[in-house]
Image (cartoon, rainbow, N blue to C red):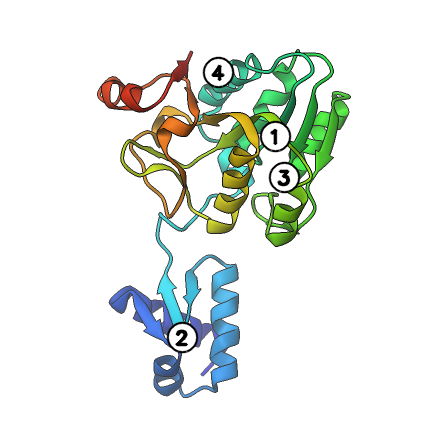
Amino acid sequence: MLTEERYAAIIERLHQQGIVKLQELVDVLGASESTIRRDLIDLESRQMLKRIHGGAALMNEKTLEPGMEEKTSKNIQQKVTIARLAAQEIENGDCIYLDAGTTTLAMIPYIEAKDVTVVTNGLSHVEALVSKRIQSYLLGGMMKIHTKAVIGSIALQNMDNFRFDKCFLGTNGVDPEMGYTTPDPEEALIKRRAHQLSGKSYVLADSSKIGEITFAKLFELEEADLITEQMPEHWRPVIAQKTKIIEG
């Protein structure tokens, strides 16, 4: 069986069952275990499935994260509004953490405070900060190819060298019960640690994220101020009970 034929068979079986075991694929496809493992690794790199212990699961919206290019083209005006509001929260002399992500990246042109120091895990962010002559530090660690975010244990260790007056974090979901969430548990660890090391935390989310829940929890709503362009009216009462809302 050709490689692409195996791939098609694996995806078809996943759509039928949701989860498949490695040994099941070996038996059905008549290929070696090492071959099937390589197939699963390649399919995961294409974001067509998610490897789990002993097999694979179908990728779904709660674990799938859009790339930097896709994010940049979405909700542009909302992001600009949120970025302006967030930048206004920065004061002279602040040491801040700026999370990777397109909305936090959009903040940089609007930072007017003087003598600001920024730590970030976003490759695009540090390039923009240097261009604006803002003193900045880029965390070391593993770079996520499609989001240009630095994650992993090395990045976490780097973060412990800093303390922040404020942190500005992106999120993919804002829910009154489940709190702030993001698709990637590795990124969630970085965001959560930045929050723990900060005197004050802000979460930036356009209105399309309100009421959404993704895979990995960051923390509760009441632990950070929420910055959005406009809170949907049906969500306003319940969200306002949990956190301060800053909106345009």
- Tell me what residue is drawn at x 37 percent, y 34 percent: 220
Q: How dense is the environment of label 3, judged by Cα within 10 Å: few (below 14), some, or many (20 and up)? A: many
Q: Eyeballing the image, is 104 above or below 65?
A: above
**What residue sits right under mark 1 in the picture?**
97
Q: Which amino acid lies under the numbered mark 1 shown in the image of this protein?
A: Tyr
Between 15 and 167, the one nearer to me in the picture = 167
Q: Label 2 to label 4, Cα distance in Å?
A: 45 Å
Q: Percent x, y for residue 164?
A: 62, 28
Residues at badges 1 and 2 in contact (C-beta under 8 Å)?
Answer: no
Q: Which amino acid lies under the numbered mark 2 shown in the image of this protein?
A: Gly
Between 189 and 76, the one nearer to me in the picture = 189
Q: Label 3 to label 1, Cα distance in Å?
A: 9 Å
Q: Eyeballing the image, is 14 above or below 179?
A: below
Residue 81's tag is 4
Closest to the camera, between mark 1 and mark 2, is 1
**What residue sits right under mark 2 in the picture?**
54
Between 4 and 218, the one nearer to me in the picture = 218
State which tag comes first along the sequence, 1 or 4. Answer: 4
**What residue sits right under mark 3 in the picture?**
121
Q: Which amino acid lies under the numbered mark 3 shown in the image of this protein?
A: Asn
**Element type where label 4 sits in the image:** helix
Q: Label 1 to label 2, Cα distance in Å?
A: 38 Å
State which tag comes first along the sequence, 3 or 4. Answer: 4
Q: Label 3 to label 2, Cα distance in Å?
A: 32 Å
Q: Label 1 to label 4, Cα distance in Å?
A: 20 Å
Q: Eyeballing the image, is 173 above or below 215?
A: above
